[in-house]
Amino acid sequence: MIADVSKSDKIVVEKSTVPVKTAEAIEKILTHNSKGINFQILSNPEFLAEGTAIQDLFNPDRVLIGGRETPEGNKAVQALKDVYAHWVPEDRILTTNLWSAELSKLAANAFLAQRISSVNAMSALCEATGADVTQVSYAVGKDTRIGPKFLNASVGFGGSCFQKDILNLVYICECNGLPEVAEYWKQVIKINDYQKNRFVNRVVSSMFNTVSNKKIAILGFAFKKDTGDTRETPAIDVCKGLLGDKARLSIFDPQVTVDQIKRDLTMKKFDWDHPLHLQPMSPTTVKQVTCVWDAYEATKDAHGICILTEWDEFKNLDFKRIYDNMQKPAFVFDGRNIVNVDQLREIGFIVYSIGKPLDAWLKDMPAVA
Ligand SMILES: NC(=O)C1=CN([C@@H]2O[C@H](COP(=O)(O)OP(=O)(O)OC[C@H]3O[C@@H](n4cnc5c(N)ncnc54)[C@H](O)[C@@H]3O)[C@@H](O)[C@H]2O)C=CC1
Ligand SMILES: O=C(O)[C@H]1O[C@H](OP(=O)(O)OP(=O)(O)OC[C@H]2O[C@@H](n3ccc(=O)[nH]c3=O)[C@H](O)[C@@H]2O)[C@H](O)[C@@H](O)[C@@H]1O
């Protein structure tokens, strides 16, 4: 397409996250169809995060530009650098060879996800030993070599990219005859799946080993706050796990539509990779699931509450009012560590908070894995 319409030399910039050496494939295709036109391929991976896209665009930690290490390649890199130099300080614009730029994007996401899996693995150990994961991650993050960011324990990471990019990395390692390296990165995903299962098991075992026909309020469905995106959200796995034990779910998310929730809970995992037009047109009604537009409505007459997204408005809910309208004993399972555990216990809730010292009630329940 680009080759078809180009009438003069062109710089083609990869912004998407791609397997290493994609630039080479693009270069070959364009060159074979070029009709004498020169193409320079640059890798300029996008590092923005959802919910903070504009800040990330205006004030990026770094901009990365990879190009061929030839005079033409250097010229193309400089041209793109000049564009960014309009608003990004020069010392934050990094230039590398093509393969380093492509791989750095995968590596950055893998490192970020690895931090979350590391702290989530610690959260399981904290629960077993009586340590508090918030205190542990604070103490660990105070080491300037480690740093404090991205160390919040959670029900698991979601989003369209972390899992996809790690699987991409794993595939590249396997293709390059590096099974041990592939296995190392796979473990980040395995711990993430373990964390989601562990959460479901904790809910089930706390509630007398079954949630069958019990009403569970799900607060938050998006993969993180300040977005309505549900791609790979841990809420899908948690909800499916609870539905597997025949729970009745009442779901509230301030930004996710009912259609989206029902589509996510209906779809088989591999369907998620399909473009929208290949996905089921209208969501099949998922029995046992209702979606409501208010946290108080979701929690009315519920036996338990699962907090799966860290929306700010959940921190300020009137939990006394919620408690009064719930079945007893009333449970809160906080998958994002946003509630004040002591306050909720004072009200009368049995509270589970990821990686925090366990409620006396939970200590007596069978160990979860
Ligand atoms: N969403 C985000 O926050 C970020 C996304 N990225 C990267 O940017 C890229 C796009 O991400 P999103 O916009 O979130 O994804 P998206 O899924 O919303 O959009 C991807 C688009 O590519 C199209 N597509 C998929 N396969 C194709 C193919 N073989 N040929 C032609 N078109 C194809 C799809 O139909 C869709 O329109 C991805 O590589 C992602 O990893 C990078 C940083 C942040
Ligand atoms: O390549 C991408 O698409 C982007 O992927 C992530 O951005 P994003 O997926 O939008 O969201 P994050 O803020 O990274 O959060 C990802 C998941 O990790 C979870 N998380 C994050 C941080 C943390 O400490 N603990 C934790 O569980 C979040 O709740 C969320 O489910 C990266 O942060 C971006 O730099 C990258 O550009």
Image: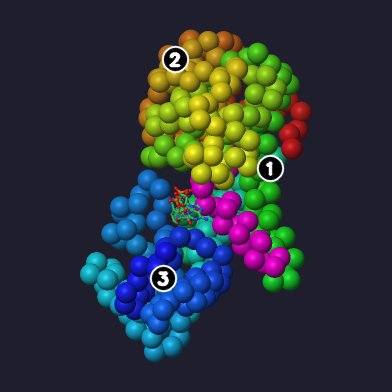
Q: Residue at x 32, y 58 (%)?
A: 57
242 vs 25, left or right, is right
Tell me which label, 1 or 2, sits earlier in the chain. 1
- Please give the residue where the numbered disc 3 appears in the rendered image: 3
**Disc 3, SS:** helix
**Looking at the picture, how far across and down is residue 358, in whole percent?**
64, 32
How many C-alpha atoms fall within 10 Å of the one at disc 1: few (<14), some, or many (≥20)? some
The residue type indicated by label 2 comes to Glu
Asked if residue 256 is among those painted magenta in the image, a careful observer would answer no
Badge 1 residue CB within 8 Å of ligand 2: no
Element marked by disc 2: helix
The residue nearer to you, when weighing 215 against 153, is: 215
Q: In the image, what residue occupies the spot 64% across and 19% down? A: 247
- For label 2, the residue is 297
Q: Amino acid at mark 3?
A: Ala
Q: Of residues 23 and 254, which is closer to you in this image?
A: 23
Picture quarter with the C terminus:
top right
Name the residue carrying label 1.
194
Q: Residue drawn at (69%, 54%), measured in percent from left and top?
A: 187
Q: Is mark 2 within 8 Å of ligand 2?
A: no
**Residue 108 visible in the displayed image:** no
Q: Disc 3 vs disc 2: Cβ atoms closer than 8 Å?
A: no
Q: Is residue 189 left or right of residue 113?
A: right
